[in-house]
Amino acid sequence: MISFQPTEEELAFIEIARDLARQKIRPLIHEKKEITDKYDRVILQMKELGILQLELPEKWGGLELPLVTQVQILQELAYGDLDFVQSLPGAGDAASLFRILPENERSKELREKFLTEEMNTVAYIDIDRSYHSVKTSLHLGVENLRPILNGKTPPVRLGETCNLLIIGLSDSTGNKQLCYVDDPGEYKIPVDNRLGLNHANVAAFHFEEVEIPPEQVIASGKEAEIILAQARARIQILQAAKEIGLARAALDYATEYTATRKAFGRHIAQFQGVSFQIAEMAIEIQAANHLLLVAAVTGDQNISQALPLALRGLNRAHRALRFATDRAVQLLGGHGYIREFPVEKWMRDAQAQVLLYGREKELLHEYGEWLVNNHKEVARL
Amino acid sequence: MISFKLSERQKQMQEMTRYIAEYEIRPIALAAEQMKRVPDDFLERMNQMGIHLNTASFNREKKKKGRKENEANRLGVIAMEELAWGDAAIALSLPGPGLGGPPIMTSGTPEQKERFLSIFTPDEPKWGAYAVTEPEAGSDVSGIRTIARKVDGGYVLNGQKIFITNGKRASWVVVFATVDPKLGRSGHRAFVVEKGMEGFSTPKIVDKMGLRANETAELVFSDCFVPDENLLGGEELYEKRVSNSSGFQVAMKTFDSTRPIVAAMAIGIARAAYEYTLDIVQKEFPKHGRLYSVAVELLAEAEQDIAASRLLTWEAAWKADLGLENAKEAAMCKALAGQMALKVCSNCLEILGPLGLDGNLVEKWFRDVKVFDIFEGTNEIQHLVIARRQYAPYGLKV
């Protein structure tokens, strides 16, 4: 039966996340991370509540929540500040990979490595799907049956602080490979990121003739291809949720501002040029949210069927996020442009987020190709 | 639990209406447009099959324990998307209470519900209609000027209504009028004016850009006497709620259940254009090059817009079924669906190029769909409704 009603359990999670976002995360926006321990205290509290391990499988120390529950929680958290959420230590996007990995010797080894105390942050990149256009991008050569990494990765979230880098890519023979690099710090190259998500520890990696030991190849060929595709869909769904959370924050901030700001003797919200933009933002965000929910619900039933829906969900979330954060700055006028107000940061964060998780147009094009090459029934989903 | 799975009833409704749309409605769409009417034998057959233009109802009571969940609004939007996919002009011409149904359901007395809604039987096709718009009052419902003067035993109506769907053929029309324009919204009353009442005429059927097979009438009331028993809800409704401007509220409440229906129809049209064009791109376009690239992106955007609009529409209908306040959601789905459906049809024509000029359904849908961004409240009115709800927590009226 068609229903938009969250479960009791989801409502309880939402409430916890909402309180955290509003009372603990949002106030950190104007704090300098380097000179305060407030960040660490909030992160510790989140860890205790299990908020850092929503996606991780139970065996990996996580809550293993359904996607539909996670997207509602993540929206609430990112409402506090997307940048903060993207900076959280732990498995990061790799949690979705761990969720998919089959139980075997290699995944067991990786799990043990991850669960050791010092191994607490993982960066993950699927090179073939990173929409990187630079010719020098990372590639995996195979010499005497030994995989050799060469080249540069694009900027990766959590790259700066990770102890483990997991890479998905095609090797020189066209086979998919999923492997990891232990202690990747020595290959790290800093990213001069002035745009946004400044706390998300973005870094790139440069490899020259780096051999990957066979035990660090988690999966190859068709198996790797399936794992990468399914992990990617999960990541797209979870990232889209965060984006909608930030878009809602921008909408609410702009609504409150325009409800109190006066010009020409009236509240500026009483000019339709202003209030209609708020309405448009609300529509766009709700539309994106519902497409995301469809992807999440489908993903919980069968992740393979959710691949195009996840692509669609993230594309729409990108669009809603960029639109809402841009409009928020516009509606605040000059105040929107100065750093005293959070909306300029959110606009920058939004753009950085889109760059990290796939260009809007590229996702749209990929989805369109899927529609044309597959079937038309999806229009009825 | 959040779910997008159709219930058994919803699935059956979708399958049945999809079948009728594909095999009964679509094949006569172009001919009906040319004739500017829907063939009588078709309407009689649909009526016998129980395929009605019934825009569901607003459930004002919260679900009681043990009682089966009301799904009338969800069934309504699912059915209307399918029927409009076949052809919106024909769907709008189907017999039934139409947009006049919801105000009778929400505000009529038990006797009125029985009298006006029981006429829709398989024996003979009959229609209901809903008349708010006037030459000088469209979006601004509070500005209506049709006068209802109280006389012994009833009211005398004087005024004019325009753009009334099925207004000429309707057995009755829910008509909004004011007892005194100076009273503003609190002066509004809703009447059920029956065909053949003295002083009630339908002098004109208008020619339109699209939806040409559907009848859009002008109604004139010249000293038209309407008995007290045709005052919707009876005098008690207005005496009780005069401070809440109840006549106006009847009109507004009606929109909460009709806007999702209108949105669903727009979605049906957009889906028709999308599927038609996708089929051509799949079969006839080379799978490379600039044209293919443009088509792929436009189709992806169209499909996404259609799905997003449908979900907003389902949400509005779901809330109505549960008896929850849904004015904002109803406005949201109508605003998005109305606008996106035109964009989808326009982009499909863009993909088809000159093909779209030659007896093509997509160009018809393009003409048909524009009005979905206008009637049941223009896009601008929907934005106003949404904005008002957005600013309500701040105590600000916009």
Image (cartoon, coloured by chain):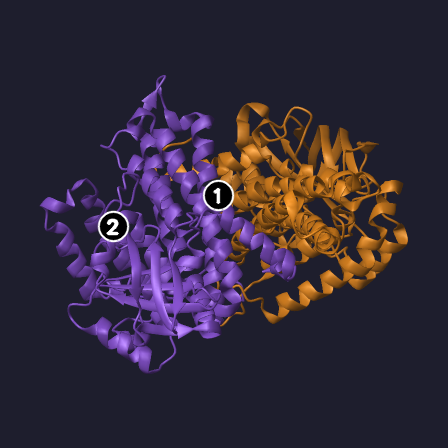
Chain colours: A purple, B orange
For the N terminus of chain B, the quadrant is bottom left
- Chain letter of the residue carrying label 1: A
Nearest the eye: B176 or B135: B135
Which tag is nearer the camera, tag 1 or tag 2?
2
Q: Position of residue A271 (x, y in %)?
A: 43, 25
Figure check: A133 above or below B204: below
Q: Is residue B343 above or below residue B24?
A: above
Q: As shown in the figure, which amino acid type bears the numbered disc 2?
A: Ile
Q: Mark 1 sits on what residue?
A: A283
Task: Give the label on residue A189, or none.
Answer: 2
Left or right, B244 with respect to B339, comes to left
How far apart, in angstroms, are the residues tagged by discs 1 and 2?
41 Å
Q: Earlier in the sequence, mark 1 or mark 2?
A: 2
- In percent of the image, x 61 and y 29: which residue is there? B179
Q: Nearer the viewer, residue B190 or A277?
A: A277
Chain letter of the residue carrying label 2: A
Q: Tell me if residue B178 comes above or below residue A283 in the rendering.
A: above
Give coordinates of residue A111: x percent, y percent: 27, 75
- Within-10-Å neighbours for mark 2: few <14, some 14–19, many 20+: some
Q: Quadrant of the C terminus of chain B?
A: top left
Query: Horizontally, is A326 left or right of A24 in the view?
Result: right
| Badge 2 element | strand
Coordinates of residue B357 in the picture (x, y in percent): 80, 38
Within 10 Å of disc 1 (Cα), the crowding (few <14, some 14-19, many 20+) is many
Is residue B18 or residue B394 the one in the foreground?
Answer: B18
Q: Amino acid at mark 1?
A: Ile
Residue B324 visible in rendering: no
Label for residue A371?
A: none
Q: Nearer the viewer, residue A61 or B149?
A: A61
